[in-house]
Amino acid sequence: MGTLLTILIIIASILLVLLVLMQNPKGGGLSTDFGSAQQLGGVKQTNDFIEKATWSLAGIIGILSIAMTLMYHEPSGVPTNDAAPQDTEQPAVPAGDVSE
């Protein structure tokens, strides 16, 4: 299950990078490539789609990251085998049995 979530996060991250690279920081972006679409209102729809897809992918990455964190999180109040206290006291030896 963890591997599947990791793969989904990687795919969503790559798609998010590609969408961000499609956008122009000055407001042009992918919509400037469609010159004839400006007359039909396609530019607004293209920008809306890219913006919604960007926010959706960012949300998906966030939700999947939280899900993975919760999946692998151990409750802090419950000791594990590694954190269990070790009994390091030596048994008491009677005073008469000490050999030198």
Image (cartoon, rainbow, N blue to C red):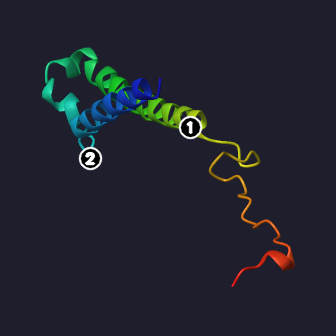
User: What's the residue type where badge 2 is placed?
Assistant: Pro
User: What's the residue type where badge 1 is placed?
Assistant: Tyr
Depth check: give the residue in front, 4 or 29. Answer: 4
Q: Is label 2 in a helix, a strand or a loop?
A: loop
Q: Position of residue 4 (x, y in %)?
A: 41, 23
Q: How crowded is mark 2: few (under 14 residues within 10 Å), some or many (20 or more)?
A: few
Residue at 71% in and 49% down: 76
State whether residue 20 is above or below residue 43.
Answer: below
Q: Position of residue 70 (x, y in %)?
A: 60, 36
Q: Is label 1 in a helix, a strand or a loop?
A: helix
Any mark on residue 25, and which? 2
Depth check: give the residue in front, 93 or 64. Answer: 93
Q: How crowded is mark 1: few (under 14 residues within 10 Å), some or many (20 or more)?
A: few
State whether residue 75 is above or below residue 34.
Answer: below
Residue placed farthest to the top in the image?
A: 40
- In this image, 65 relative to 100: left or right? left
Q: Where is residue 1 in the image (x, y as percent from the top left)?
A: 47, 23
Cα–Cα span, label 1 and label 2: 38 Å
Q: Where is residue 8 in the image (x, y as percent from the top left)?
A: 38, 26
Contact between marks 1 and 2 (CB within 8 A): the answer is: no
State whether residue 93 is above or below residue 62.
Answer: below
**How many numbered badges does the structure rendering display?**
2
Depth check: give the residue in front, 7 or 46. Answer: 7
Q: Mark 1 = which residue?
A: 72
Residue at 33% in and 33% down: 10
